[in-house]
Image: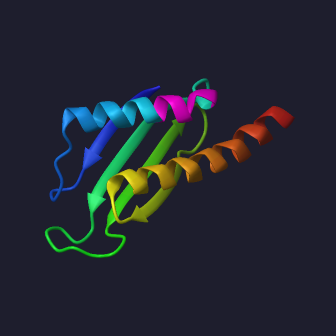
Amino acid sequence: MTIQFNTDKNLTVHQNFKNKLSAAFTKELSRFSDNITRLEVHLSDENGQKSGKNDKRCLLEARMERRQPVVVTADADSHDLAVDKAIEKLKASLDNIVGKLRQY
């Protein structure tokens, strides 16, 4: 599974944070590694320099062979929390899709 990071103009992600996220994605999504070819991670700060509640966004796009991409988003007060929420949403969606594939 290839992991690709994308950020908006308001955000710079350091390599240490990317490494931490890559390890979390690999661990949390390991049971889907046969199904996911690429995971695109889009991190953004919706308010830019201004602070606000739930202004950090994580959008995850899981690409699967011969399937439409699975996309989930989550907003939170920090990028860590937004990523955690998005991972949980993605796992729920993938459980549903992979479960249906195994039925056939």
Position of residue 45 measured from the top left corner of the image (x, y, whole percent): 25, 63
9 lies above or below 62: below
Quadrant showing the C terminus = top right
Say how the picture is coloured. Answer: rainbow
In reply to whether residue 28 is colored magenta, the answer given is: yes
The spot of residue 85 in percent (x, y) is 50, 55
Horizontally, is 8 left or right of 101 in the view?
A: left
Q: In the figure, is residue 28 to the left or right of 19?
A: right
Residue 61 within the magenta-colored segment of the rendering: no
Q: Can you say whether 48 is above or below 44 in the image?
A: below
The front one of 42 and 19 is: 19
Magenta stretch mostly in which secondary structure? helix
Q: How many marks?
A: 0
Q: Does residue 104 show up?
A: no
Q: Locate residue 20 relative to residue 37 in the image: left or right.
A: left
Can residue 32 be seen at all in this image of the molecule? yes
- Point out residue 94 in the picture as x, y percentages from the top left corner: 64, 43
Residue drawn at x 46%, y 59% is 73
Q: Residue at x 37, y 37 (%)?
A: 21
Instruction: Say left or right for 31 vs 23.
Output: right
Residue drawn at x 41%, y 57% is 82
Q: Which residues are magenta?
A: 25-31
**Where residue 48 appears, x then y in whole percent?**
17, 68
